[in-house]
Amino acid sequence: REAVVALGRLKAAEAVPAIINRLQDTSEFGNVRSAAASVLGTIGDVRAVEPLANAMIDKDKSVITQSMQSLRKMKNDPAVSNLLAKLFIKEFKQDNITRVVNILMILNKEDILSNLNDTGNEDIQTITNYLDFIELNYGDLSNTRYSSRSAVIKQLTAIQKDDIKKSEDETLQTTVDITALRDTLKSENAQVR
């Protein structure tokens, strides 16, 4: 732990890969990984963005909290903000609610929307609607404490499951309707012959 902290004091960019390894090494104690997250935030190197974002789903709460704090420190760097926004879009498209909420606890709606130029128009509208929904129901999560995170994730997961169930029900009803139409057409064709 002390070695990691010492590297952080030096702000040694060349040590970033080794510190990232400490952060990602789950055999390390939580306090070492938490210190690595802190040091990466102090150094502020863009290479640490994705590892820190990934650490926000760690089993150790101190690692999660420190990773979030480090990313919040780094988010004013346009390159970091851009990487986080791209990561948000990727996770959003994969319906990974936990990671989406984690990123929203760092970046605000405007940060994400300003980085949407690489996506298609349909994605822009969908993401904008989602961010509007989050803002309307939960406010700006970028200033939210870690302790509020699980409640938001639970609610959004329930909404997502409900939407999936509705979609499955609609698909089933469409299949039934198509089958009935096919049977009617077969019957009418048999009568015509």
Image (spheres, grey):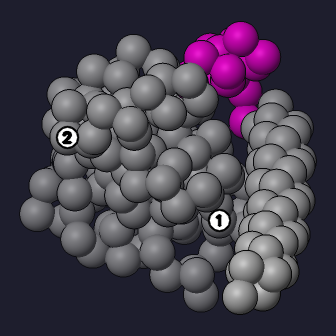
Residues 10 and 78: in front is 78
**Which secondary structure, mark 2?**
helix
Point out the stretch of residues depicted in magenta: 131-146
Q: Is residue 133 left or right of residue 176?
A: left
The reply to whether residue 56 is in sight is no
Residues 33 and 120: in front is 120
Q: Is residue 143 left or right of residue 180?
A: left
Q: Is residue 74 left or right of residue 133?
A: left
Residues 37 and 55: in front is 55
Residues 101 and 172: in front is 172
Mark 2 or mark 1, which has the lower sequence index?
1
> Where does the image place residue 14, in percent across and percent down from the top left?
11, 63
**Residue flagged by tag 1: what amino acid is it?**
Asp
**Which secondary structure, mark 1?**
loop
Measured Cα–Cα span from mark 2 to mark 1: 29 Å
The reply to whether residue 188 is in sight is yes
Q: Is the magenta stretch mostly helix, strand or loop?
A: helix
> Where does the image place residue 9, in percent across and percent down from the top left?
28, 45
Residue under the image location 81 percent in, 81 percent down: 191
Q: In this view, does 8 lie to the left or right of 34?
A: left
**Pointer 1 residue:** 58
**Pointer 2 residue:** 118
